[in-house]
Amino acid sequence: MYGTATPGPSRSDRAFEWRSRLSIFVGGLLCFETLSGLWIWLLPFSIPSQILVLLHTVFGVLFLLPYLIYQGRHWWVHRGGPWSHYRVTGYVAFAAVAVNAISGVVLTLQSVFGTAISYTWDTVHIITTLAILAFVIPHVVLLIIRDRRGRAEQAQVVLAAEKRWVGGVLAWSVAGFAALALYGLLYEPVQWVNEFPADYHTEEGRSPFSPSLATTASGGAYDDRSLSDSESCGSAGCHESIYREWAVSAHRWSSMDPAFQVIQEVMAKQNGPESTRYCGGCHDPVSLFSGTKNVFTEDLSSIRGYNEGVSCLVCHSIRETDLKGNANYTIAQPERYLYEAKPGATAKFISDFLIRAYPAKHMEVFSKRLFKTPEYCAACHKQFIDEEVNKVGWVQLQNQYDNWRKSKWNPEGEPEKVVECRECHMPLQDSDDPAAGDDLDSYRTAQDGKHRDHRFIAANSFIPTLLELPGWEEHNELTVAWLQGKRAIPEIEYKWASGPAVSIEIQAPDTVRPGEEIDIRVVISSNKVGHDFPTGPLDIIQSWINLEVTDDKGRVLLASGALDVQHFIQPGAFMFKAEPVDQAGNLIDRHNLWEMVGVRYRRALFPGFKDVARYMVACPSETAIPASEAVTGDGASREFLLSTPADAGTLRVRASLDYRKIDQYLLDFVFGEDNQLTAPVVQMAVQEKTIQIKEG
């Protein structure tokens, strides 16, 4: 309402404006929209706040057309006349409401059809809401004060109309909040069943998740629905790329891995189903926290846990980690939005809309600085066995975190030279994801248009292929490229050496005379790996030197590290591996780590270090000594003695550093000896050298 001095509308005109049902309706909606907007902005996340987001949006849409009609008519009636403070506040209020309405429409369209709201438009919406308060209230109050001073009978008519207008506005506002109360009474939130099964067994005085060190913030069970449904993250149009990356990753298949399932079953039969909780914190957390790793649970996994492994919600709901390892973390049950866990397209639409329109809680719960630290990864990527598991005592297993912490990739006092876990295994990807941009992360800005790759590429290629997970072909290509050093990571490339993650170099003389011995050395250098190579469960991972020496007629003079027809590595190869043993000294060869008490042999490369495989080839002028009779070894290096035919003019030496994730013995144990399955072998690095044999 634009109050004016004479000339201007008559008192009867002003009374009509105040009594107008359209004026009352528009004023009531404006009051409700302003108050509900302040509630959403200032008060904590809650069911009423989310309902208000929906009502605020619906009533805002209803407000637009009536407001345009009312505002146009109001301007026409009160146009002209001298400028005054009534007129100034009116025009500024009109501008504030107009911009607020425009920003509201933009935010609504972004929430319905986009993947995220614009923080610029959101800020405009908030500022103009405050401007509405600052100018609409004074505009109305000053007009009422002015009219109260009048003594004429017509002034009393205007005052009566103003009282009716105020009462109508308040009534419409109260009606809006009554709708909030009614909606709140009718809405039935998903009731999580945060209880262990009636037959759930745990020992007194111990965590219900023991021997895993993982625990919940409540100390009790979590409904498996509350930590699953990762697909919804990718089907909302928001995190589609990230979901596709995760869907083929080792985190996703950590529970459905057939080898894990068989080994878990063996452990359960031998030590009781409860013992498998040791594995659950890292491999099958949804099942662990919902209480399915129990006496009477046949498969020891929930349907959701089996399908999702380390789900999106599990990883992003961890609130605290400890450097002890063995899944020593605390997870909180995430607060979910209205309808988020309910079935149906309508529920999905509403929950997606709420997350985009009201994202503060979503970001608070699922985006934390903790997730960007090596200490976060350490919770699972550091493992040990203690007396509770092996009945003997503490034994260190894989430990990527401390390897990295003590390596050249983490130089003390030189942060510009540090390379952390995510920088290697989660390289930046061009992205239009709402999560793109992060000024709290290394090499990042809030507007960089990138997200971190959730494939977690390392050395896993067999299981995605076996399970035919969507995207397995690309995943395998990236894995091979990573191992061979062919995948560039521009943001940290200047800190790395070029070439494979682990390189090899053949050191041998260029020429040799008949009768001389050839000292062939293969130097293996860990160039880019941020922890031991190989890492992980070294009882099943194999990396070895595959060396072949041939003459210029193509005859094989020495073959070390070749696979036999049953896919086993031939004895005597230079290998990186570990040989864990149980109390009786028996080899742990079925990944039965719960029986492990130590290792009888272990060979791995620390970051930045080298190792040497040595081969001695005799080159007599007449007869050859069979290689099988001349193999020796000293534990630190292996020597292979071989003579070469006198008529060989050249020798060709070819060496490769080969890698496979699962050894053949374990595959035969898991799938049966007739399965015909074998893990793919990746040639991480290859080098060749020609040696000339001179006469005389």
Image (cartoon, rainbow, N blue to C red):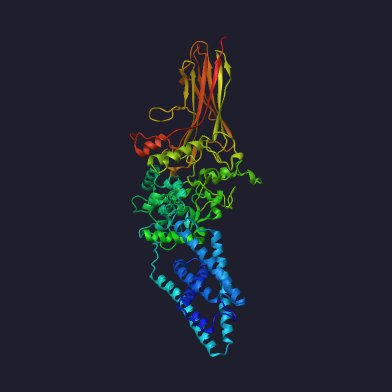
**Up/down of 274 relative to 146, above or below:** above
Q: Where is residue 99 in the image (x, y as percent from the top left)?
A: 54, 65
What's the residue at 53%, 19% (across, down)?
617
Q: Position of residue 387 (x, y in %)?
A: 47, 48
Q: Which residue lies furthest to the top in this view?
A: 696
Quadrant location of residue 62?
Answer: bottom left
Q: Nearest the camera: 284 or 293?
A: 284
Q: Nearest the camera: 582 or 96?
A: 96
The quarter of the picture where the N terminus appears is: bottom right
On the question of residue 545 being in view, the answer is: yes
Q: Where is residue 309 in the image (x, y as percent from the top left)?
A: 42, 49
Q: Position of residue 404 (x, y in %)?
A: 57, 43
Q: Nearest the camera: 596 or 191?
A: 191
Quadrant location of residue 583?
Answer: top left
Query: Viewed as shown, does residue 133 lie left or right of 214?
Result: right
Q: How many marks?
A: 0
The quarter of the picture where the C terminus appears is: top right
On the question of residue 579 being in view, the answer is: no
